Amino acid sequence: MALTIEINHAKTRAKAAAAGSAQPVVPQAVKGRIRRLKWIILLLTLSIYYVTPFLRWDRGPNAPDQALLLDFVHGRLYFFFAEIWPQDLYLVTGLLVLASTILILTNALAGRLWCGFACPQTVWSDLFLLVERLIEGDRRQRLKNLDAPLDAKRAMQIVAKHSAWLLISLATGGTLIFYFTDAPELLRSFARGDVSANMLGWIVAFAGTTYGLAGFAREQVCTFMCPWPRLQGAIWDPEAFTVNYRDYRGEQRTSAKKAAELRLQGKPAGDCVDCNQCVTVCPIGIDIREGPNFACINCGLCVDACDSVMSKLGRPRGLIDYEGWNNIERGRRAEPPVFRLVRPKTVGLTAACLVLTAAIVLSFMTKTSATLSVQHDRDPLAVRLSDGSVRNASNS
Amino acid sequence: MNKSSATHAYTLSVSGVDAKMAIIGNESLAPIEVPAEGSEAVRVTLTAMSPREAELVFTARDESGTTILSAKDRFVER
Ligand code: SF4
Ligand code: SF4
């Protein structure tokens, strides 16, 4: 297949790096159906993260009743009904391989969907941005703040923002510790002020990571630190529903007023009014109108931004949309879109996921709660007794 | 090795060879108690009057009979 798309990732990186040094990405708030969905997923994922260590699961006497517990001291991983011993770690490996395969399948169907909606980096960055917006205002105000002198009001804002970020980070770091020990008991120790230096060290390390990654590194993680965008060059799929700009509809860009005049004269006019809303809401700082970008996390916020502009202008929504790149090219040739969810790659990956799932379930079902091993004596292997009989000995 | 959180007693038997099995220190071949999340090692001898090389299977059954464990070995003449 002729790949007609030009994805110059090096150029993107250079541009992002240059932009990064000149001006940080300061995303603007946006409203819309995708933003609402993202809020719901954010609430759901954060609730799962903070609540899970407190879920109980009765395993009978002499066993911990924490539903999810990574007990490193005793070498056990408890997950609801499952109990994994070190020798069962192949099951965890299997699950990790399955998760990677599902991620690749998702990528083949809808690009970096995981990145845009459920990745912890996105979720916590979104939360930190929400705090930033509530305290410092939306994009315009925050951009002004960049060059504003440090007066009392600004100093208060900075202190409030970083205090809130630190509180969230500490809660995040603290919660992570709960996964490794009995959570309610540890919470009671916290209340008594009885925290070991080791525990405190881990909490500070995890809190510091959250604070640094969600408060400062943000889009840099999704573009430069994470291996997933690096892999996009190999696994990017032109049939996948990635966020794209329908340039055949949007170009030539012109102002809303000029476009209306041109249309009145029966002349063609692009739908894009060059308002830059799609760029200002982007948490990565991408202009998706330049074409597909490996750094795009497929979050769809630019879709919401452009849809609201189109609605206000009385133009059809979907100038930016989840659309396969092949369909953008078909659109340019005025051909109807073709949706090919079922294709060799997706069928193969789905089959791999099913086989892996079946293998993991089967291994788990046939796993016993005990093991028996036999070590035959090496020297001597056998002993001939005086009555002519032969004796073998072993340790069981 | 008992990976469950309760103590279990396992009865050891062997098949595949015509030999008398003995567990040192447990002449009556009574079930072997293995504590919760613990292991137990026993020394086993197999004595054959008319010895021949054979594949054999050790089997350990818990008291309920639901957990059946097995391990392979080989009976050798010399
Ligand atoms: S270009 Fe659009 S979909 Fe991609 S990261 Fe930016 S806002 Fe999200
Ligand atoms: S939001 Fe839509 S109309 Fe505005 S610049 Fe982006 S693509 Fe053009």
Image (spheres, coloured by chain):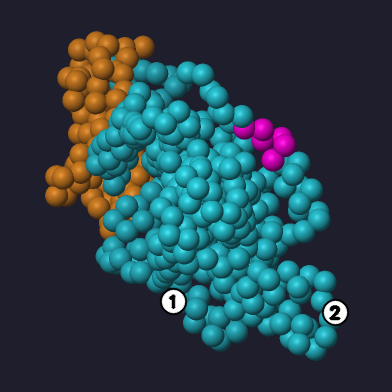
Type of the residue with mark 1: Pro
Which residue shows up at 14% across the image and 45% down it?
B65
Name the residue carrying label 1: A184
- Assess whether residue A257 is covered by the magenta stretch: no
Name the residue carrying label 2: A149
Q: Position of residue A32 (x, y in %)?
A: 44, 64
Question: Between residues A314 and A369, which one lies in front from this camera angle?
Answer: A314
Q: Quarter of the image holding residue B47?
A: top left
Q: Farthest residue in the bottom direction?
A: A152
Question: Between residues A140 and A127, which one lies in front from this camera angle?
Answer: A140
Chain A: its colour in the image is cyan
Chain B: its colour in the image is orange
Q: Position of residue A50 (x, y in %)?
A: 46, 69
Q: Are there few (<14), some (14-19), or many (20+) residues within 10 Å of tag 2? A: few
Chain to which mark 2 belongs: A
Which residue shows up at 68% across the image and 52% down it?
A220
Same subunit under labels 1 and 2? yes
In this orientation, does residue A332 appear? yes
Question: Between residues A321 and A214, which one lies in front from this camera angle?
Answer: A321
Question: Closer to us: mark 1 or mark 2?
Answer: 2
Q: Are there few (<14), some (14-19), or many (20+) residues within 10 Å of tag 1? A: some
Question: Which residues make up the magenta segment?
Answer: A7-12
